[in-house]
Image: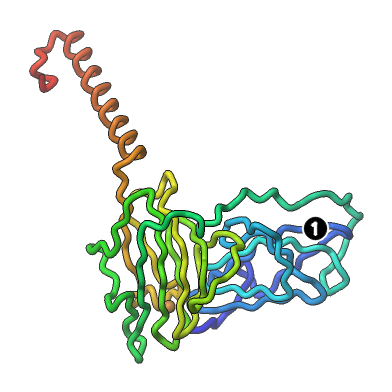
């Protein structure tokens, strides 16, 4: 269903106030099931400093915020002439934007693999597919070695709206419909044009991403009807070695504790499994 009730912070209408000279940070997320939002603030422009939780390399000034499914933006809103209620005493001006951590331009990274995925669906919308398959949690669709940097082209081979989203990490969009796009930062959602494609570079390099997770269309109706796939990042490098070493140390400490307990209580060491 498309938006029977639309709300902000769970309410039909909210009132915001700002002091003269004040700059506020607004974090806006599209948490609807199936809707796209195009937000405008009368008499104001948005200073976009982050998208999907990732800081932009440079601030962008936008009249309209286009929010696809699952996307989030951090914007600075300044008191200007407009319809915002302005109350209170003026505030001292000062720097408000965080200093952006440098997001690396992944186009310079060595690409270890290329993949193409196709998002399709039944005409009656009963089933939605990635590469012709509906999601099966018992199946691993993609296996990646930790440390890889891959270029994925995700095709929308339908006339419907689809939004690509992957868990655990952020990626860099490098092309839309085969045409290069400028580097602005890293995101974790991107709309795939109907009958078009997006190309992204995904770094499987983070310390905490080893394991199994999913990527899917962020239109909830679509992912619920199959448009999701599982990915496993195999880590036979530092993280898993450290993890394995910690497990062995933990086992050893337990064993020693058992032996001490047995010796103190005059029990045979066989009791400890020795
Ligand atoms: Cu979709």
Q: Is residue 252 above or below residue 78?
A: above
Q: Is residue 234 above or below residue 132?
A: above
The quarter of the picture where residue 217 lies is: bottom left
Q: Nearer the viewer, residue 263 or 181?
A: 181
The quarter of the picture where residue 154 lies is: bottom left
Residue under the point 70% across and 62% down: 75
Give the mark count. Answer: 1
Q: Is residue 219 above or below residue 111?
A: below
| Residue 273 position in % (x across, y down) | 11, 22
Q: Is residue 81 left or right of residue 162?
A: right
Q: Is residue 99 above or below residue 117?
A: above
Residue under the point 27% across and 75% down: 133
| Residue 53 position in % (x across, y down) | 58, 57
| Residue 201 position in % (x across, y down) | 46, 62
For label 1, the SS is strand
Q: Quadrant of ligand 1?
A: bottom left
Residue under the point 84% across and 68% down: 85
The quarter of the picture where residue 48 lies is: bottom right
Whether the residue carrying mark 1 lies under 8 Å from ligand 1 is answered with no
Q: Is residue 74 left or right of residue 130?
A: right
The single residue placed furthest to the bottom in the displayed view is 123
Q: Nearer the viewer, residue 163 or 16?
A: 163
Q: Is residue 128 left or right of residue 68?
A: left
Q: Nearer the viewer, residue 185 or 34?
A: 185
Q: Name the image quarter holding the C terminus.
A: top left
Query: Quick one: label 1, few (<14), some, or many (20+) residues within 10 Å?
Result: some
Q: Nearer the viewer, residue 99 or 37?
A: 99
User: What residue is pinned by disc 1?
Assistant: 23
Residue under the point 22% across and 62% down: 138
């Amino acid at each position: 269903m498309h938006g029977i009730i639309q709300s902000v912070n769970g309410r039909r209408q909210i009132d915001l106030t700002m002091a003269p000279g004040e700059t506020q940070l607004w974090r806006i997320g599209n948490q609807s099931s199936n809707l796209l939002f195009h937000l405008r603030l009368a008499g104001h422009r948005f200073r976009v400093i982050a998208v999907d939780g990732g800081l932009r390399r440079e601030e962008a000034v936008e009249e309209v915020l286009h929010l696809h499914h699952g996307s989030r933006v951090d914007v600075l809103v300044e008191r200007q002439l407009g319809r915002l209620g302005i109350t209170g005493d003026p505030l001292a001006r000062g720097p408000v934007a965080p200093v952006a951590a440098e997001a690396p331009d992944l186009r310079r990274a060595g690409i270890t693999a290329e993949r193409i995925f196709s998002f399709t669906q039944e005409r009656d919308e009963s089933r939605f597919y990635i590469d012709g398959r509906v999601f099966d949690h018992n199946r691993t669709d993609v296996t990646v070695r930790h440390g890889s940097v891959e270029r994925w082209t995700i095709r929308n081979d339908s006339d419907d709206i689809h939004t690509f989203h992957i868990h655990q990490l952020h990626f860099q969009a490098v092309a839309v419909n085969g045409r290069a796009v400028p580097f602005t930062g890293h995101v974790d959602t991107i709309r795939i044009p109907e009958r078009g494609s997006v190309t992204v570079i995904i770094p499987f390099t983070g310390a905490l991403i080893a394991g199994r997770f999913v990527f899917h269309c962020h239109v909830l109706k679509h992912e619920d009807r199959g448009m999701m796939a599982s990915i496993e990042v195999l880590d036979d490098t530092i993280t898993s070695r450290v993890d394995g070493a910690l497990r062995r140390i933990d086992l050893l400490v337990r064993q020693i504790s058992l032996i001490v307990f047995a010796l103190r209580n005059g029990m045979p060491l066989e009791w400890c499994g020795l």
